[in-house]
Image: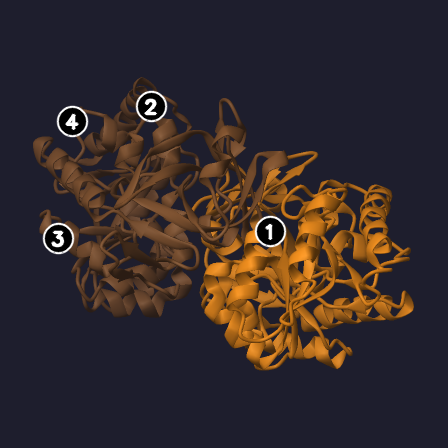
Chain colours: A orange, B brown
Amino acid sequence: MIIKPTLLLDETKCKANIAFMADKAKIHNVELRPHFKTHQSLEIGRWFKDAGVTKITVSSLDMANYFATAWNDITVAFPINILEIETINDLASRITLNLLIESKTSLKFLEKHLKHSVNFYIKINIGNNRAGLLHYDSESIDALLEISKNSTKLNFIGFLGHAGQTYKCRSKSDIISVHEEAKKKLVNLKNQYVTNYPNIIASYGDTPSCSVAENFEGIDEIRPGNYAFYDMMQVQIGSCKVNDIAVALECPIVAIHPKQSEVVIYGGGIHLSKDRMEDSNFGTIYGNVAQKTSNGWNDIIANTYVRGISQEHGIVKAPESNLANYKVGDTLLVLPVHSCMTADLMKRYKTLEDVEITMMINR
Amino acid sequence: MIIKPTLLLDETKCKANIAFMADKAKIHNVELRPHFKTHQSLEIGRWFKDAGVTKITVSSLDMANYFATAWNDITVAFPINILEIETINDLASRITLNLLIESKTSLKFLEKHLKHSVNFYIKINIGNNRAGLLHYDSESIDALLEISKNSTKLNFIGFLGHAGQTYKCRSKSDIISVHEEAKKKLVNLKNQYVTNYPNIIASYGDTPSCSVAENFEGIDEIRPGNYAFYDMMQVQIGSCKVNDIAVALECPIVAIHPKQSEVVIYGGGIHLSKDRMEDSNFGTIYGNVAQKTSNGWNDIIANTYVRGISQEHGIVKAPESNLANYKVGDTLLVLPVHSCMTADLMKRYKTLEDVEITMMINR
């Protein structure tokens, strides 16, 4: 029995997602280095270990620090923030720390201030246009390698790209075509440098590609993260089915508005985040509503969605004919648009077996 | 010197905002019951006390609980969540607790389970279409008053409305016209019931109206909250000027992309929130960038804005001619789109005098 917005975790679905990707990586002979920014939990991390995962990805040094008690090979998939050099040195003394480099300033700074050796990938923009050097920018790449070539502390391990542009896809075939193009950019780059650097790898990411694609030729490592939970955005992209989604926000119902055919829930932007998606029928939505069962949830309820959220309020649009199913003092389940952001806000999970699972609190 | 995304608070600007609204309430002879969901801090709360404030508004029972150590008259401006009856009873035993009612189910439940008396407002939808009974729905209002009329624990204190539709305004004159219409709905309702309930009040909210309007006739109490900090959205609405904004997120610069004329910052959706606004020149933006000074910040920098954010990344678009002003390892300041959401995420402030200010952590 919950009394406040609570993030439910379906352990069975989550473990099935973890197993799916572990198996897929084995079949394709790529190393799976999952991104842990989605769940941010040591306990859920153990489920990955049970599936054979030995290396992980995180998105901040704080997160690396949190996971360093249990994992000894961690990639921080974010252009390194040199202001945190003390944390970098501390981590580098304890684990195999892999950093992302795209700037000469950062690399020179590290060379000067590192007390222990680290590995680094060169971060490549393979089409997402967020971070990284442009994939054809050999001049900048060479300038970085010039800095590191005689270093005893900076070990170049390869090229890392994230094909985040798959988030704009809306079908499996879309995803595959974006994936092929992005992959080619990264693999070509690796092939260009592998003669001089025979041990380098191509590290590739994103949940849509890794969920759907079946050709990873030339890729050595994949870093999907969201797939552990999936969410409504991933359903829309074409990465998964609704039944694969492993988290739902259970929200108290605080008012029913029959004239507007709406239900007001305690569950807003500070719980779900303000992440949104465009529904082809309903415009901007902030989540779908799933059918509660005695143990978890079934499919989403047709024509029922979170049409607006503010700090603590969520407004659910529901067909008039279904309104009688909702009662003040009862709860309903929202399948989030973006599970990573919802988890980050909620800071804990409750399994369907009523067990609380903690996660990293500070950042 | 900061090393990670840090929410800076300009105490002088914040105190000036607090004083502005306190003075305005006095001039218009309305009670100021500011909404504390914006800052969520006992320490900042004391600045309101120094300005003569004695009653406050919050958005959850958890927040009421946090502030109950220092404030003895608290309104929870959210349709009451009866699942939290234990917290309600605990708070009602300690402070004057004012609840929002809009459902018969909730009111009957309270009548049955309350151990101490509480005040309640009837929540009215005065045009925002989020929560509340429709302002012309006398039938539902009467049904609620029928339940409470013989109660010794339920004390009806008036009507409460939030003209949140002012957030769609884009000028002062827009705000005033929306304000006049919304106010009329609330005041008319009070006038309709005041003969039978002579002590009831009209409680009215929202930062845009309260910042800009000069006619509060018939209103007894105002509940603005965001004005303590303001933000870029309030600038766009017409509630304030950029120089009134009292918070800025200081973000490490982690990469510069001259070809795209972009700066990558450590500062994303888990810091700023995914709240966004439409800029007439640049489309969807997630914040503006302000000019750092030796002690705080000046105006926003022209044609410079956060064009995209993901979990930890922010991508700042800047004119090519300004790119030389940004350096990896330095920081820049983002004025948030929505300061309430940013504060809620950041969980602490750092004043320009380098003092850390804590806020409520749990919800």
At numbered mark 1, what does the secondary structure look like: helix, strand or loop? Answer: loop
Q: Name the residue under label 1.
A: A103
Q: What amino acid type should be assigned to the residue bearing mark 2? A: Val
Q: Where is residue A61 in the image (x, y as percent from the top left)?
A: 53, 66
Give the Cα separation between the discs numbered 4 and 1. Answer: 60 Å
| In the displayed structure image, the side of residue B271 where residue B163 appears, left or right | left
Which dot marks residue B178?
2
Marked residue chain, label 3: B
Q: What residue is disc 3 on? A: B49
**Mark 1 nearby-residue class (10 Å; few <14, some 14–19, many ≥20):** many
At mark 4, the secondary structure is: loop
What residue sits 25% from the left and 43% below the top? Answer: B228
**Is A358 above or below relative to B205?**
below
* Cα distance in 3D space between marks 2 and 1: 50 Å
CA separation, marks 3 and 2? Answer: 30 Å
Q: What residue type is labelled 3?
A: Lys
Q: Mark 2 against mark 1, which lies toward the viewer? A: 1
Q: Which of A30 and B89 is in front in this view?
A: A30
| Same-subunit check for callouts 4 and 1 | no
The three-letter code of the residue at mark 4 reads Glu
Q: Residues within 10 Å of mark 4 (few under 14, many from 20)?
A: few
User: Going from the N terminus, do you reach mark 2 or mark 4 first?
Assistant: 2
Along the viewing direction, whichever of B247 and A337 lies nearer the viewer: B247
Q: Nearer the viewer, residue B31 or B45?
A: B45
User: Cα distance, mark 2 to mark 4?
Assistant: 15 Å
Residue under pointer 4: B217
For the N terminus of chain B, give its image quadrant: bottom left
Q: Where is residue A295 in the image (x, y as percent from the top left)?
A: 66, 70
